[in-house]
Amino acid sequence: MASVDPVGPNLLAMRLGETLREIRKADSVAYLTLFLAVVFGFQSWPFQLSVQLALLVVLLAPSMAQRPALWLLLSMAASITLVHERDLADNHKYLLCYWLWVMCIAHIPSDRELRDRIIRFNARFFLIFIFLGAALQKFLSSTYMTGGMFELELLLDDRFRAFGHLVGIDPSLGEENLRRFNLLQHPYVQVLDDKIKLLSNDHVHYVAKLVTLYDFYVQVAIGVLLLFCREVTDTFADLLLLFFIFTTYLPAPVWGFGVTLSVLGFALAKERSQFMSAAYLLAMVAVLVYQVPWGDWVLGT
């Protein structure tokens, strides 16, 4: 009877550890940023042409990812596109544009240690700004903290139908509310005072309130923990941020934002923790996998 080589798993773990160390030593934040720009960047032709040329150049000469001229090209293309699409661009597109400028500025100094400090500082700044800024905006909103916004999303937004089904929300509520909403938009149907009454129940309100509280307090905790700039608080912030990425971007199809947060988290943790660095890479993979049509499978469509 053949015996299992006990060295096999140990050898695999050792090689995986070596690979992670090589990733951390390399200019991996630049490569991940380029990946983000290619997959979840702007769709305008100037940006697409720029990012495709940049990808081709880096594939042929990887050291070009350390040249500020390459990031200047992408930053300018993103900025021009953002000016033209400022009313339509998602939040993570603004963040991508800012981060491209960070990469451009960070690669101007020849000193690698200074470059890494610039990247880490800005990764921390943007994560704090994103989470505490978003939390403040939500706290001041007249509808968010009541759960009204998420309740409306659960009742009307097709993207949350599968999630609603998983948490026990009656799909007939969404169908009836969508029918009523379509009547409001119908050019040949007059609705009294241009208002409709949406159907809901206590369970929908409870789920919406629970999601609202989770979203708000996790974001506050991440932002506050990162303010202290201490290893122990950074570790707790990493764990919460990873939890946020893994749980939020499965039901919420804003995958570009999920990958952006993973890149920022990786940039902040790269020099500090091999385990957290690997976890952020895994989070990126998870967000990409979340793009499979799992909602159709849940709904049986």
Image: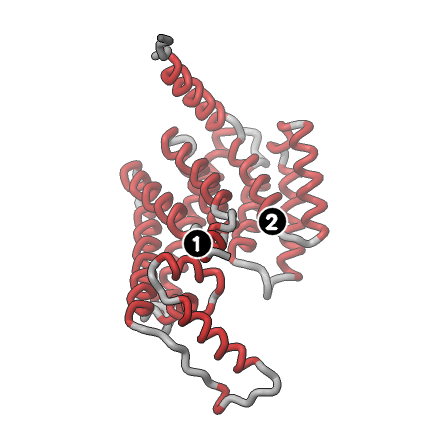
Q: Does dot 2 land on a helix, a strand or a loop?
A: loop
Report which quarter residue 219 is drawn in.
Answer: bottom left
Count of labels shown?
2
Q: Residue at x 47, y 23 (%)?
A: 19
Identify the residue at the far front of this view.
1
The quadrant in which residue 54 appears is: top right
Instruction: Tell me if mark 2 has few (under 14), some (14-19) or many (20+) residues whose alpha carbon lies within 10 angstroms of its own.
Output: some
Disc 1 packing (10 Å; few <14; some 14–19; many ≥20): few
Task: Note whether 55 is above or below 298 in the view shown.
Answer: above
The reply, left or right, for residue 78 in relation to residue 161 is right
Front residue of 15 and 82: 15
Q: Which quadrant: the N terminus? A: top left
Residue bearing mark 2: 41
Mark carried by residue 35: none
Identified by mark 1, the residue type is: Val
Q: Position of residue 166 (x, y in %)?
A: 37, 57
Find disc 1 in the rendering and name its residue: 298
Question: How far apart, in angstroms, are the residues tagged by discs 2 and 1?
Answer: 29 Å
Residue 186 x/y as whole percent: 58, 82
